[in-house]
Amino acid sequence: MPNFSFYLLFSVTLLLPATVLSASAAKKKPNTRTTKKPARSTAKAKKKIAPKKRKKVSVKKLPGKFPSLASKNIVGQSYKLPDGLPGKFNLVLISFKRKQTALMKQWIKLAKKQAKKHRKFDCFIFPVMGTGIRFLRGIIHAGMRSGTKDPQARKRLLPLYIKKPPFRKALRIPNEKTIYALLIDKQGHVYWRSTG
């Protein structure tokens, strides 16, 4: 199941201290004694509260890096990966088998919600296929287009006809039994990952 835990990469909260003086505290009672007492020091009352400094959130890179590749989406647009992807951060969903489509749809729903909240975030789907079926690319793309009605989803669907072992090794993907979700930047560095 999808598990989103990277809200810290996109959300920053600013906390500004505020001081509120009540009206009752501001009023002074009249002095009924005849002898005058020396005025108390008001240095403490006049002391200003300095605003808190924002902590810089540092995000660690995880092992693995998305390799440099060239690909086309199923409508024919070319992409240079990963730096050609539009988002500052991109969620890439990597699948290896057709039966993993149901899991992929769950991730896509969550990714759409995040894309609405964060302008610098985008999501792309990479069905990874071997180089041996590259000659069937036209038939495969036609089948994917018929199964994907949304024009925006078609643009984000980029089949990869590559050698699987080097690709998996670069991204530290142990097997092809499930799908892999990776949050990467334009250089291909991985900041978050999940499976299933």
Image: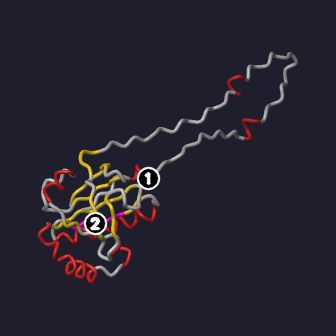
In the image as oriented, which residue stretches furthest toward the bottom?
146
First reached walking from the N terminus: tag 2 or tag 1: 1
Q: Is residue 51 above or below residue 46?
A: below
Q: Which image quarter is the C terminus in? A: bottom left
In the image as oriented, which residue stretches furthest toward the right?
34
Q: Nearer the viewer, residue 147 or 48?
A: 147
Q: Quadrant of residue 148?
A: bottom left
Element under disc 2: strand
Q: Nearer the viewer, residue 10 or 174?
A: 174
Q: Is residue 76 above or below residue 30?
A: below
Classify residue 123 as left or right of residue 166: right
Which residue is painted at 25% across and 54% down in the image? Answer: 67
Classify residue 35 as left or right of residue 83: right
Q: Which image quarter is the N terminus in? A: bottom left
Q: Which residue is mark 1?
A: 10
Q: Which residue is mark 2?
A: 71
| Model colouring | secondary structure
x and y, in percent, of residue 155 in the image: 35, 72
- In this picture, which residue range is highlighted in magenta? 123-127
Is 176 magenta? The answer is: no
x and y, in percent, of residue 181 in the image: 26, 58
Amino acid found under the numbered disc labelled 2 = Ser
Which residue is painted at 47% across and 60% down in the image? Answer: 119
Is 124 magenta? The answer is: yes
Q: Nearer the viewer, residue 177 or 166?
A: 166
- The crowding category of the residue bearing disc 1, from other C-alpha atoms within 10 Å (few below 14, some 14 to 19, many at least 20), is few
Q: Main secondary structure of the magenta part?
A: strand
Which residue is painted at 19% across and 67% down in the image? Answer: 161
Q: Quadrant of residue 177?
A: bottom left
Element under disc 1: loop
Classify residue 172 as left or right of residue 145: left
